[in-house]
Amino acid sequence: MSEHETVPVRLDARSYDIVIGPGLIARAASHIAPYIRAPRVIIITDAHVGPLYAKPLAADCAARGMRCDTLTLPAGEATKSFTQFEKLLNDLLALKPDRKTTLIALGGGVIGDITGFAASVLLRGVDFIQIPTSLLAQVDSSVGGKTGINTAHGKNLVGSFYQPKRVLIDTATLQTLPPRELRAGYAEILKYGLIGNPDFYQWLLRHGGEILAGDTPSLAKAIGESCRMKAAIVSADEREGDVRALLNFGHTFGHALEAECGYNDLLVHGEAVAVGMVMACRLSEKLGYLNRTVGDGLIQHLRAVGLPATPRDIRADWDANRLLAHMYGDKKAENGTLTFIVLKNLGEAVVVKDVAETLALDTLKECLT
Ligand code: NAD
Ligand code: GLY
């Protein structure tokens, strides 16, 4: 039996497979070769992941006859900036790529997002392949083609929809991922259960501890299930016309918290999503949709696995009005009104437009105290 699982993302001419399994990086070239237009690849990685995985990947590509260069960016969210984007494009151009060159994003969501965006504009578009190495990137950001960078006006506000040619998820890379980052990725896994799969959510409540302890079968199941859910949603709604928006559950609140923290190590993205999901549960209650037990249970589970559950778990001083102002800058805000993803029930998420500002502010104030 193959130790790899393949999950298709069906998007007509832009369809591709997600391949999941341990040890894929060392054998990546054979998975990549059928999907590149010329034997010329450029690996883009960060300063944490590069020293661990870029050499074996480059060696395997070279052994397969590919010309291969590697560019290493600083690690961390601050890399998703105009400055780093400009530098990346200039460094790429200095390597004289042509339109058949393929970029390989080797790293977490930061590297995947900036590389995908670079691929979408370099020479008006070159191919790219995702090799995600953080849990968050493996279950979410490497799949679905959202690419981009942050701006002073907010997170991910400049970018493109641009699908990779293939996603190679080497689950063995999680062995070197810092525990805090593993927990951050786990928050996005919980999101899939909360928005659309109550059985999976209940399973996660029972097995979350094992997943975070690195138990291989539990991790493989959680990654596979998350990728299947993400692939189905992206296949149904690639450009976020309707159902894909549900993947932003917890993100309107979470992005506001991240913006207030200045996109630094005080709060990493998955942690912001964890807290944001609790806040979205509280808003769902105020809208009269959700029983309070769901949010209470989520808080209990997040704390049990070592994730922050409320803004005060991150820091003591928050200003509700400042967070509200960030939420108006969210991509989902339409015509100056607030849009949120809320839960009608466990496993049933909906988009609610034009939410009254007082309700959003009440939710913020409740969650900040
Ligand atoms: P990240 O890329 O900063 O990675 C987290 C940290 O882990 C970094 O320090 C990185 O160097 C390190 N790391 C990654 N893999 C490692 C490994 N195997 N061993 C050791 N260290 C490793 O952050 P992330 O949490 O992966 O991604 C967050 C980003 O993803 C945010 O910018 C967020 O906006 C974006 N995102 C995008 C989408 C999308 O659909 N495009 C979805 C969700 C999140
Ligand atoms: N992570 C949200 C999306 O891919 O749509």
Image: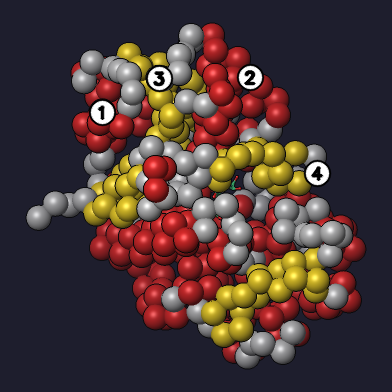
The residue under label 3 is 100
SS of the residue under disc 4: loop
- Which quarter of the rendered picture does the N terminus lie within? bottom left
- Say which residue appears at 26% left-offset and 28% top-offset: 33
SS of the residue under disc 2: helix
Q: CA distance from mark 2 to mark 4?
A: 21 Å
SS of the residue under disc 1: helix
Characterize the local packing of mark 3: few (<14), some (14-19) or many (20 or more) Cα atoms within 10 angstroms: some
SS of the residue under disc 3: loop
For marks 3 and 1, the one nearer the N-term is: 1
Task: Please say if the residues under marks 3 and 2 sit with CB atoms less than 8 Å apart.
Answer: no
For marks 2 and 4, the one nearer the N-term is: 2
Q: Please give left or right for residue 358 compared with residue 363 in the image.
A: right
The residue under label 2 is 87
318 w.r.t. 104: above or below: below
Q: Nearer the viewer, mark 1 or mark 2?
A: 1
Tag 1: amino acid? Ala
Q: Please give left or right for residue 355 compared with residue 222 in the image.
A: right
Q: Is residue 319 visible?
A: no
